Image (spheres, rainbow, N blue to C red):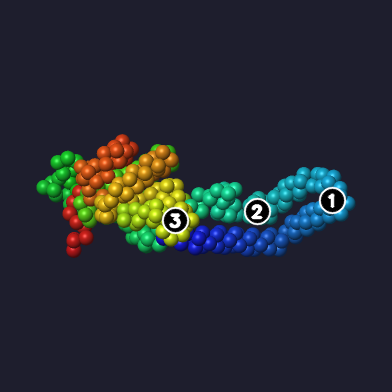
């Protein structure tokens, strides 16, 4: 997880490939058009020659006026090309380069700032490195089987007033609403319950849906999250690489902290959790935390001020039932 320069190189290579493929596709479309409508090829040659001749005169004769009116002429020719395209059964924009991301033109950057598509690509690499991408293919809203949860009235939770089955249907509905409202509300979720009842599965469902809608998602177990931040604290490894890793923890659209309470507890982990929660709240970034801990245990382990942030700013999803991993 620390080889950030390698990740950056991989992402840049991906964008280079996307741009190359876009140019190959444009060349193929251009060949189709030229075969069917030679007039458009003649117009393209005209534009190229005219632009070259004017630029040459401007440079050789130090005459900036040689370029006067060139843009207007080219726009007029472009309009004529569009009419010819339509007349020959092609879309008017058939000879325009097509980008997967119009914001950065498939470069990964808007100015010097990483584009949202770059952050999404980084998320996918980080998730793949944590084996989460493989998990998302099998754990998502389409594969969730609510029938695994009991609807036996004897297993009804008195606090929730619902059986495990009725409760999980409610949790699923709220999770889907969280995804639908994600860009408007920037919400947060605490998923709590006993071991093996599907907390990570619900997190995976949300993560997959948001990745599919071009959001950046970062998954960490509590142990790996605090390990990363502690490495940064003590400057182990490559400081630049770790600073980028830390930046993604605070800047990604959704951070998932899985299995809070399973890590080795120290004063640092308590402080780091507060910093992550607080900074992401201030930045309007969403966080999902899953845990086996009770509210009282969260207060005892991570302080009342940390719990206060969670209580005030997080939706609480309690999942009940028996350990699904022990089912036949």
What percent of the width, then of the height, locates residue 44? 75, 56
Q: CA distance from mark 3 to mark 1?
A: 50 Å
> Viewed as shown, does residue 181 lie left or right of 58?
left
What percent of the width, then of the height, locates residue 79? 72, 47
First in sequence, mark 2 or 3: give its number.
Answer: 2
Are dots 1 and 2 in contact, CB under 8 Å? Answer: no
In front: label 2 or label 3: 3
Q: Identify the residue under disc 1.
A: 58
Q: Identify the residue under disc 3.
A: 242
Residue 175, relative to residue 106: is it above or below?
Answer: above
Q: CA distance from mark 2 to mark 3?
A: 40 Å
Residue 138 sits in which quadrant? bottom left
Give the structural element (helix, strand or loop) at label 3.
helix
Give the structural element (helix, strand or loop) at label 2.
loop
Considering depth in this image, is 236 or 293 the residue closer to the camera?
A: 236
Residue 13 sits in which quadrant? bottom right
Are dots 2 and 3 in contact, CB under 8 Å? Answer: no
């Amino acid at each position: 997880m620390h080889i950030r320069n390698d990740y950056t190189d991989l992402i840049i290579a991906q964008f280079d490939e996307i741009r190359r493929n876009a140019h190959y596709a444009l060349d193929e479309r251009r060949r189709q058009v030229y075969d069917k409508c030679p007039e458009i090829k003649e117009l393209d040659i005209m534009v190229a020659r005219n632009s070259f001749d004017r630029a040459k005169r401007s440079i050789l004769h130090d005459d900036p006026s040689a370029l006067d009116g060139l843009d207007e002429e080219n726009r007029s020719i472009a309009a004529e090309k569009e009419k010819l395209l339509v007349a020959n059964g092609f879309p008017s924009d058939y000879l325009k380069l097509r980008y997967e991301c119009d914001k950065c033109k498939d470069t990964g950057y808007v100015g010097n700032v990483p584009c949202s598509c770059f952050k999404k690509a980084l998320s996918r690499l980080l998730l793949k490195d944590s084996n989460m991408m493989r998990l998302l293919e099998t754990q998502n809203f389409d594969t969730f089987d609510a029938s695994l949860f009991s609807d036996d009235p004897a297993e009804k939770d008195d606090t929730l007033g619902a059986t495990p089955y009725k409760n999980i249907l409610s949790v699923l509905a709220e999770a889907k609403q969280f995804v639908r409202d994600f860009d408007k509300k920037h919400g947060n979720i605490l998923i709590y319950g006993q071991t093996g009842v599907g907390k990570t599965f619900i997190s995976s469902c949300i993560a997959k849906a948001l990745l599919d809608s071009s959001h950046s998602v970062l998954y960490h177990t509590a142990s790996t999250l605090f390990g990363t931040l502690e490495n940064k604290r003590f400057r182990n490894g490559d400081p630049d690489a770790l600073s980028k890793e830390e930046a993604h923890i605070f800047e990604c659209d959704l951070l998932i902290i899985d299995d809070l309470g399973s890590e080795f507890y120290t004063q640092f982990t308590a402080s780091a959790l507060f910093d992550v929660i607080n900074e992401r709240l201030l930045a309007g970034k969403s966080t999902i935390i899953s845990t086996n801990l009770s509210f009282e245990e969260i207060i005892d382990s991570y302080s009342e001020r940390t719990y206060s942030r969670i209580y005030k700013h997080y939706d609480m999803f309690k999942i009940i039932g028996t350990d699904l991993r022990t089912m036949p």
